[in-house]
Image: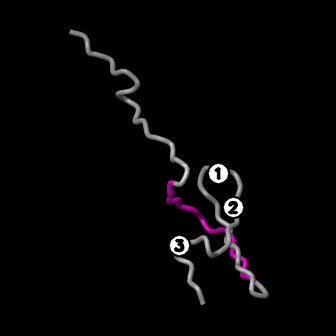
Amino acid sequence: MSKRVPIPRETIKVSRLPAKGDTLKLTAEVVRLAEGEDGRQGLVTVRIPGYPIPISLPESYLADAVED
């Protein structure tokens, strides 16, 4: 008796791509903090695994940002 070979659809988990408006949660490493001067917001530079360059964001984009 021969064993049945599974078809690729059975062995690979297929997931959908995010749609416009979806919220994504990413894990990133903080590589630099720049405090704001003269009333400006500070910048946080992060590195996302798998993305080749760091990304700088205003501190207000972070979910846990503390407002003074």
Q: Which residues are magenta?
A: 22-36
Q: Which mark is residue 51?
A: 1
Mark 3 nearby-residue class (10 Å; few <14, some 14–19, many ≥20):
few
Residue contact at pointers 1 and 3, CB within 8 angstroms: no
Q: In the rendered structure, which amino acid carries the disc numbered 1?
A: Tyr
Q: Is residue 27 magenta?
A: yes
Q: Residue 8's spot in the image, x, y percent?
A: 40, 24
Residue in view at x 64 percent, y 60 percent: 47
Q: Residue 38's spot in the image, x, y percent?
A: 79, 88
Q: Which mark is residue 29?
A: none
Q: Secondary structure at mark 2?
A: strand
Q: Secondary structure at mark 1?
A: loop
Q: Which mark is residue 55?
A: 2
Residue in view at x 44 percent, y 40 percent: 15
Residue 53 falls in image quadrant: bottom right
Cα distance in 3D space between marks 1 and 3 = 21 Å
Q: Residue 17's spot in the image, x, y percent?
A: 51, 43
Give the mark, 1 or 3, whose residue is nearer the N terminus: 1
Give the side of residue 61 with respect to residue 36, left or right: left
Residue in view at x 65 percent, y 51 percent: 51
Q: Is residue 32 above or below residue 13?
A: below
